[in-house]
Image (cartoon, helix red, strand yellow):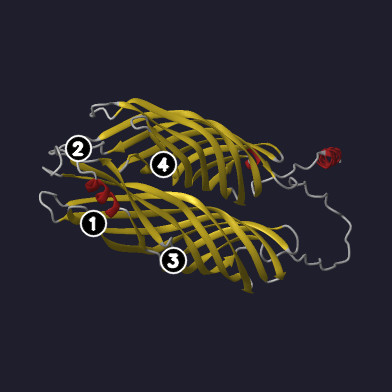
Amino acid sequence: MKKIIVTATLLASSASIALAAPPTPPAPGWTGTYGGITGGWGWGTSSQTDPGIPVFTPTNTEGPPADGRYGMRGGLFGGSLGSNWQMGSWVYGLEGDLSWSNLRGSSNVCGPLTATPHPCGTNLDALGTFRGRIGYAAGPGGNWLLYATGGLAVGDIHGWDALTPASGNVWRAGWTLGAGVETMIAPNLTAKLEYLYVDLGNGQVFNVAPGIPESVGLTANIVRAGISYKFGSPAAPPPPPLYTKAPYTKAPIMAGSPWSGWYGGVNVGYVDGADRINTDATVLQFSTFAPIAAAMAAGATSQLPIGNSEFIGGGQVGYNWALSPKLLVGVEADIQDSSLSNSAAVTTVVPVPFSPSFVTNVAASRSVDYLGTVRGRLGATVTPTALLYVTGGLAYGGVKSSTTISQTNAAAPLQPNAVAGTFSDTRAGYAVGAGGEWMFAPKWSVKGEYLYYDLGSANYGTGNFAIDTGPTGFPGTGIAAVGTTTHVHFNGNIVRAGLNYHLN
């Protein structure tokens, strides 16, 4: 009997302790939308390359190659916005950020093989990324997130060269990969430490002299810290259990927006481009008979009609938030393969006093190999299953252009000339547009969309040519020389249809 009483007492004490202890609230989790600030330090390498400025003599119209390679370093500060989706211990998300940057570097001996070594340099004035994240929630309550990340990077590159002097800016797209760790320091507040490797490629930024392209490449390592605020209320502990049995009633169904949440799909359509490419020529050196160089430059200056439309197709992924029953905002990213590739050719005849005419053939091409966007969307539902929206944001793409110029004159000893130049880069710009979407079945929707895109323009050097005019009826002899440049704009319109599957 005494043993039974002692056992009962211990059980009662244990029960009272268990009832008195407050329930442990669950971890708030990583699911949700967040925004914050980031800051850090970067270091990397930039390179500049040009073929050298020609020295025009009867036997030499080319210059030695000129190169510069140097380190860069500096700070970054900006903001970020993202959204996470947690499944068990695994966390998936999207994050975008934009930072002011003062990464810069220079060398005092660019062009070491030339007769005039000189300073040149590169600044990275801004850096943005749009990345996917995949992480694992570890530690007590899963409040530590270890993640890998990667995706698109865009940067505002400024290059300069003190030789002529010359400089230029371009928004270029590239890629980034990295990893980080993030921890919850309060119910709605997290802190993170992150490393990113950024490659913005190599491409022409400016002409160091007429007809002479200067290419700039840039890679960087970024280490930064950040603080983020998670929007919405933190998870609350569950209510205490009720021990009285209530009569059964069916819970009311709360109707949510069918547009909220993640979605993905495919799209097809048409894309067009700017309707012309321009070539220009600058007289670098007059011969004794000045009309020769003027005629050479006039013949190499032309306007080529080139625009038309081609097929485009790819896929998209996005996320919508319902602000009210009729209003929603969202973000969408897409990438498409493009067959937009156009070419044109023109022939001009420029007369010269007391000499046969100059006949010039100019051929140019332009292509957009792929095109992607990362855009915000603001929409209104005209019916529960019909959505109208406006959209705008970042555009990026792989672009190419090439030009050949050949020129002849029947008068001896004027030699035939031929020059050529190419341009290839991954450019960043903007896209704006509007569209409509119809949910024709649960979780399935179709859309029609128009976008205007602009990846900026490029002025690329297409070479120099020169002729030795030889003896003339005027005193002396001399060489006439011309530098040529091509101007191309990578912009146009997209009209497309899409099919989406919604995960909500």
Question: How far apart are the two marked residues, 3 and 2, measured between alpha carbons?
Answer: 46 Å
Residue at mark 3:
312
The residue sitting at 32% across, 59% down in the picture is 365
Neighbours of disc 4 within 10 Å: few (<14), some (14-19), many (20+): many
- Residue 427 lies, in percent from the top left, at 43, 49
- Mark 4 or mark 1, which is nearer to you? 1
Mark 1 nearby-residue class (10 Å; few <14, some 14–19, many ≥20): some
Give the residue number, with chain letter if any, for mark 4.
Answer: 199
Residue 359 can be seen in this image: yes
- In primary-sequence order, the first of circles 3 and 2 is 2
Per the model, the C-alpha gap separating discs 1 and 3 is: 45 Å
Foreground label between 3 and 4:
3
Q: Nearer the viewer, residue 322 or 336?
A: 336
Tag 1 and tag 3, C-beta contact below 8 Å? no
58, above or below 367, in the image: above
Tell me the element at label 1: strand
Which residue is located at x 46 percent, y 68 percent? 270
| Sequence-wise first label, 3 or 4 | 4
Badge 1 is on which residue?
Answer: 351
Check disc 2 and report the residue beneath it: 56
Q: Amino acid at mark 4?
A: Asp
Quadrant of the image containing the C terminus: bottom right
Q: Nearer the viewer, mark 1 or mark 3?
A: 1
Q: Are marks 1 and 2 in contact (CB under 8 Å)?
A: no
Q: Quadrant of residue 3?
A: top right
**Residue at horizontal 47%, vertical 69%?**
269
